[in-house]
């Protein structure tokens, strides 16, 4: 009887391991396929990132309008922003920024994009502290919104158009799939 329960336990453990692995590996794999398909059917390789930009700015606008006394609303908005920024930054830092060409002698073109993401994280930390203490967060939310708006403007008017011109046709679906996969890694 112990061998039967040992086998059941092994099957149960095997199923759990397969479930955990599947739940962590399947979403990025499906996102990669979906992103590639979207571009092959005429989509834009940076569409997901540009939609993220709109959502992030919208969340920041709602955060700026949220009353200080509404701890639940502020907490929900902060968590939405933090998750969306994490997914977005991971996709840009791991997929997009490495392919940005460094035309400057000291490589600042790519570095400043990473530096701006670091500034955003510092402001997020300040916002979280203000949220926890019940203080007004507009002194950090508004500068974060301004920073992100400038960052978005540069990406959408300079960085993405340059990359679109440089991408070969077969590279666009691959890039879109990689962006979708990176965002899917943040659950």
Image (spheres, rainbow, N blue to C red):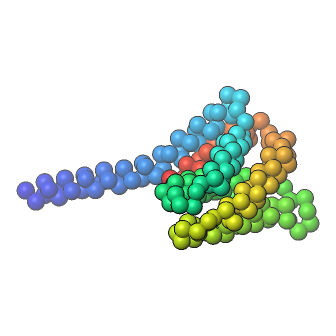
Q: Nearer the viewer, residue 38 or 47?
A: 47
* Image quadrant where one finds the N terminus: bottom left
Q: Position of residue 176 (x, y in %)?
A: 67, 42
Q: Position of residue 118 (x, y in %)?
A: 70, 67
Residue found 80% across the figure and 46% down from its top: 156
Q: Position of residue 106 (x, y in %)?
A: 88, 68
Left or right of 107 in this view: 36: left
Left or right of 103 in this view: 22: left
Residue 169 drawn above or below residue 84: above
How many labels were placed on the picture? 0
Residue found 21% across the figure and 56% down from its top: 9
Q: Nearer the viewer, residue 166 or 139?
A: 139
- Residue 82: image quadrant is bottom right
Q: Would you say residue 94 is visible in this rendering?
A: no
Residue found 84% across the figure and 55% down from its top: 101
Q: Position of residue 27 (x, y in %)?
A: 50, 45
Residue found 85% across the figure and 61% down from its top: 109
Q: Nearer the viewer, residue 173 or 55?
A: 55
Q: Would you say residue 129 is visible in this rendering?
A: yes
Residue 161 drawn above or below residue 11: above
- Residue 103: image quadrant is bottom right
Farthest top residue in view: 41
Farthest left residue in view: 1
Residue 151 drawn above or below residue 47: below
Left or right of 159 in this view: 118: left
Q: Nearer the viewer, residue 71 or 31?
A: 71
């Amino acid at each position: 009887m112990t061998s039967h329960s040992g086998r059941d336990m092994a099957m149960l453990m095997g199923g759990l391991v397969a479930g955990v692995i599947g739940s962590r590996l399947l979403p990025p794999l499906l996102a990669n396929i979906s992103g590639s398909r979207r571009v092959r059917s005429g989509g834009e390789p940076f569409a997901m990132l540009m939609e993220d930009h709109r959502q992030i700015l919208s969340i920041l606008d709602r955060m700026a309008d949220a009353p200080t006394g509404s701890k639940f609303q502020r907490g929900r908005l902060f968590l939405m922003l933090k998750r969306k920024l994490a997914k977005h930054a991971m996709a840009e830092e791991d997929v997009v920024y490495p392919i940005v060409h460094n035309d400057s002698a000291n490589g600042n073109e790519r570095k400043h994009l990473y530096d701006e993401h670091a500034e955003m994280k510092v402001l997020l930390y300040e916002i979280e502290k203000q949220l926890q203490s019940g203080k007004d967060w507009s002194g950090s939310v508004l500068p974060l919104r301004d920073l992100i708006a400038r960052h978005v403007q540069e990406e959408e008017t300079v960085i993405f158009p340059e990359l679109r011109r440089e991408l070969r046709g077969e590279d666009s679906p691959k890039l879109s799939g990689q962006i979708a996969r990176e965002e899917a890694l943040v659950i």
